[in-house]
Every structure is written in C-alpha cells, then in structure tokens.
Amino acid sequence: MREIAAPQQAVYDTLSNLQNIEKVRSRIPDDKATGLSFDNDSVSVSVPPVGKISMRIVAREEPKCIKFETTTSPVPFNFWIQLLPVTAATCKMKLTIKAELNPFIKGMVKKPLEEGIEKIADALQAISYV
C-alpha cells in the first residue's frame, strides 16, 4: 500500500483516464520502455526484454477501483488499482497483479512482474493529482 497526498476522488479521476499518462511520460526511462501509446481506455508499451504489453481498462468502480486486462502480452495477466480513503485529503493505493502461470514460468517472471508493479507504484505515487 502506498499513501498518496491527494483525495481518493482526485486520484481516481486521474487514473481512470489513461490519457493522463502524459503527466508521467517524462519519468519513464527510454531504456525501460519504448513505444508508449495510450488513449482513454488502453495503453501499450514495449518493455525490453519482455516485449510489447498492451492493457485495457475492463472495469471502473468509482472512486475505488480500476481493473485492467492484457490484450497483448507474452504472459496474460489482470491488474487492478484499488484506492481507499484515509482522510479527506489523502488516500492509499494498492496495486495487484494476477496471472495464471505454470510453476516453471512463474519462477521466471515473478520477480520481473513484482519489480514492474513497484515501478508503476512509484510513478503513480509521484503524480500531482491536485
């Protein structure tokens, strides 16, 4: 869980429209991700050495949850962002990833997926929501 210094609704409003990725584009190192493209409901990026990953929003539960699923990925997965109010001016964010993996593949991708989630959380925590 990450605490964000912004109200739950403001964070939800920003994250539920993927066009707001433009706000963090400059924070994504070129060697970590290339070919970033997005619209209101989907995002695509090439991540060396994984390859192209595309996700789309499949559900929005205002103001508490945004659910994604992959449309293009070497490893299909679901991803969601949960937002919980702490005070009127702050909230907590939890990122969750779920992938159906056999034990062999799980051993190879578990650490990169966890590191990816942490980097996403860092970027989302750094956004100015107000």
Image: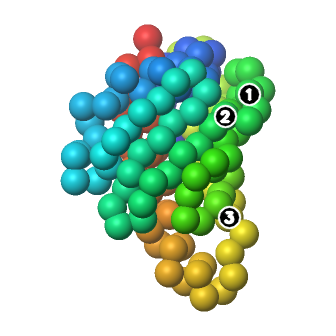
* SS at circle 3: loop
Q: CA distance from mark 3 to mark 2?
A: 16 Å
Of the residues shown, which amino acid type is indicated by label 3? Ala
Look at the numbered discs 2 and 1 and tell me whether their residues touch, using CB distance below 8 Å: yes
Viewer can see residue 90 = no
Which numbered circle lies on residue 60? 1
Q: Position of residue 22 (x, y in %)?
A: 37, 23
Name the residue rendered at 24%, 31% in the picture: 26
Report crowding for label 3: few under 14, some 14 to 19, many 20 or more residues within 10 A (C-alpha).
few
Q: Is residue 29 left or right of residue 127?
A: left
Give the amino acid type for the residue marked by disc 1 in the picture.
Arg
Residue that sits furthest to the bottom in the current view: 104
Q: Looking at the picture, how far across and down is residue 15, in whole percent? A: 55, 26
Tag shown at residue 124:
none
Q: Residue furthest top?
A: 130
Closer to viewer: mark 2 or mark 1: 2
In space, the residues marked 2 and 1 are separated at their CA atoms by 7 Å
Query: Are the residues tagged 3 and 1 within 8 Å (C-beta)?
Result: no
- Is 122 situated left or right of 3 in this image? left
Residue 98 visible from this viewpoint: yes
